[in-house]
Image (tube, rainbow, N blue to C red):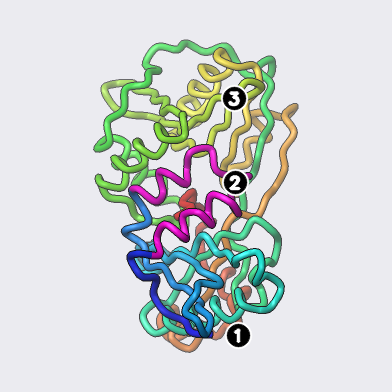
Amino acid sequence: MKLRLAKPNEERVIYNWWKEIFAFDDGGYTDYYFQHLYPQAKTYVLADEQDELVSCLNVHPKVIVMNGERFRASMIVGILTVPKHQHKGHMHELLNGVLKILSATELFTLIQAYKDGAYAPFGFEDAYFLRQFIIDQKYLPVMSAAGVSTVVDPEAMKGLYESFIAHFNGAALRNLDDFNGLIEEVKAQKGRILTYTADNALKAYALVYPHTSHIDIDEIVYTDTKSLMTLLSALGNSNPRLLCRVSQAEDLSRLLPNCPMELKTYTAIRINDLALFNTHFKLNVKNTKEALHAFRAPFWIRENT
């Protein structure tokens, strides 16, 4: 097997794999991804002796903030193996090869991990968790919808986001282009963005995806409890059932004591050079799990690319 970057003429093949293998989680995202995000990624493939693709993954460059410092990192997404080649160890070979490449240039690598410990054999540790609340409208306070709208201002969203992530570790920095892209991504998946403005300032925004039975709240960023509850109250008027995902540190149980909550694994992180990590942070940890306890603030991320 040979590890290499994907060729331009292989994009359509990889797109078709995505449509087949990730059909359960598509909702229009695959088309948006390959039109707007795939060109920004490095796509690594494992090819057989005939140079036919066997397995592939995509790597997106990131800058993440740890203890107030910025670090270059990558997010690994879209790991797949062609069905006829599955269960032969090809994904392991591909991932180990790519991690060796990334380890030469970055201290942290992230990977989507929707199953506990899925990538532990590769040195990853689950670090980002989501609290998923099922919110019934009857448990939401009735609040004024003044200031709530679907008008979006990417610059204002960027400023609010930067203030919000200052309370966390591991969040990815976003520039104005990222927010313009995020707005288009939400539209592509038939979602919308709800905002709340007060005193001429953006106080909260939420990325929401309406369904017949409920509304998915995929990201909600806010300045305070009032702003958060104002958006939730407004969304509850649109649909009596909300599915709201926030970070592990955002325990809304006191605000929503009667709403069921489930904790889910979201993203794992790998420290590629423990010696360098210990030197930089003046620590003496032996693995990524120990290292996670060295960070003062909790982890937050919503990125899936």
- First in residue order: circle 3 vs circle 1: 3
Give whichever of discs 2 and 3 has the lower sequence position. Answer: 2
Circles 3 and 1: CB atoms closer than 8 Å: no
Name the kind of residue labelled 1 in the image. Answer: Lys
Q: Where 2 sits versus 70, above or below?
A: below
In front of the other: label 3 or label 1? 3
Which disc, if any, is residue 211?
3
Q: Tell which of 202 and 46 is nearer to you.
A: 46
Q: Residue at horizontal 55%, vertical 81%? A: 96
Q: Of tags 1 and 2, which is closer to the observer?
A: 2
Of tags 2 and 3, which is closer to the observer?
2
- Kindly report the secondary structure that dominates the magenta region of the rendered protein: helix
- Residue 229 drawn at (x, y percent): 53, 24
Tell whether label 2 touches label 1 (CB within 8 Å): no
User: Which image quarter is the N terminus in?
Assistant: bottom right
Whether the magenta-drawn stretch holds residue 27 is answered as yes
Real-space Cα separation, disc 2 to disc 3, in angstroms: 18 Å
Q: Give the number of the disc on residue 286.
A: 1
Residue 155 lies, in percent from the top left, at: 24, 37
**Residue 82 at x, y percent in the picture:** 60, 65
- Residue tagged 2: 23
Residue 27: image location, x then y, percent: 53, 38
Is residue 138 found left or right of 159 in the rendered image?
right
**Is 14 in front, or is 274?**
14
Q: Quadrant of residue 54?
A: bottom right
Q: Earlier in the sequence, mark 1 or mark 2?
A: 2
Pointer 2 local density, CA inside 10 Å: few below 14, some 14–19, many at least 20: few
Residue stretch rendered in magenta on the structure: 10-35
Residue type highlighted by circle 3: His
